[in-house]
Image: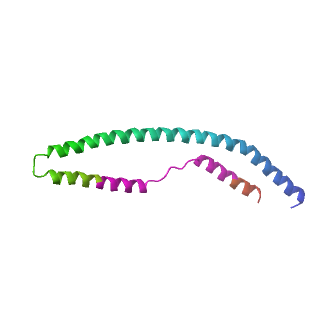
């Protein structure tokens, strides 16, 4: 290969990269907006769910203990409620650890990867 061919090849690569940089910036902005909106929705929903669940479960636990108040099983019921909460907490923690994390910016990453492959093929 001559120097002229190499320079021409690299000039084409530079044009390609500069034209794609604008596309990457637009794609990045779109994905960031989408990720932000999704995150805000999920956080609000989780907070509302957590507050509602805590109130519901607190009153349920109080109702269970009050129901057993005048029986000889009141201590066992109270410890049973506490043990149930411990088991629920352990199961929830295990479930959270096994969840697959979200992949933000996966479209941008795929586009950059495919463009890098195209550049590698063009430079061969």
Decide whether residue 103 is among the magenta residues.
yes
Numbered range of the magenta stretch: 86-115
Determine the image quadrant of residue 90: bottom left
| Magenta stretch holds residue 30 | no
Residue at image point 42% right, 39% down: 45
Front position in the image: 38 or 71: 71
- Where is residue 22? Give x, y as percent: 72, 42
Quarter of the image with the C terminus is bottom right
Q: Give left or right: position of 32 versus 21.
A: left
* Rendered location of residue 21, percent (x, y): 72, 45
- What color scheme is it? rainbow
What residue appears at the point 34 percent right and 38 percent down from the top-left corner?
52
User: Measured from the top left, where is residue 61 in percent x and y?
Assistant: 23, 45
- The residue closer to the viewer here, 116 or 121, is 116
Q: Is residue 93 left or right of residue 57?
A: right
User: Where 41 sits versus 84, above or below?
Assistant: above
For the point 30% across and 40% down, which residue is it? 55
């Amino acid at each position: 290969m001559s120097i002229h061919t190499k320079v021409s090849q690299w000039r084409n690569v530079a044009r390609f990269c500069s034209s794609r940089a604008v596309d990457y910036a637009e794609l990045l902005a779109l994905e960031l907006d989408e990720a932000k909106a999704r995150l805000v929705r999920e956080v609000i929903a989780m907070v509302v769910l957590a507050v509602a669940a805590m109130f519901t479960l607190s009153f349920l636990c109080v109702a269970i203990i009050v129901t057993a108040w005048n029986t000889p099983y009141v201590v066992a019921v109270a410890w049973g409620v506490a043990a149930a909460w411990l088991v629920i907490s352990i199961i929830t923690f295990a479930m959270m650890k096994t969840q697959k994390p979200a992949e933000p910016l996966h479209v941008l990453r795929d586009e950059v990867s495919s463009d890098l492959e195209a550049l590698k093929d063009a430079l061969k």
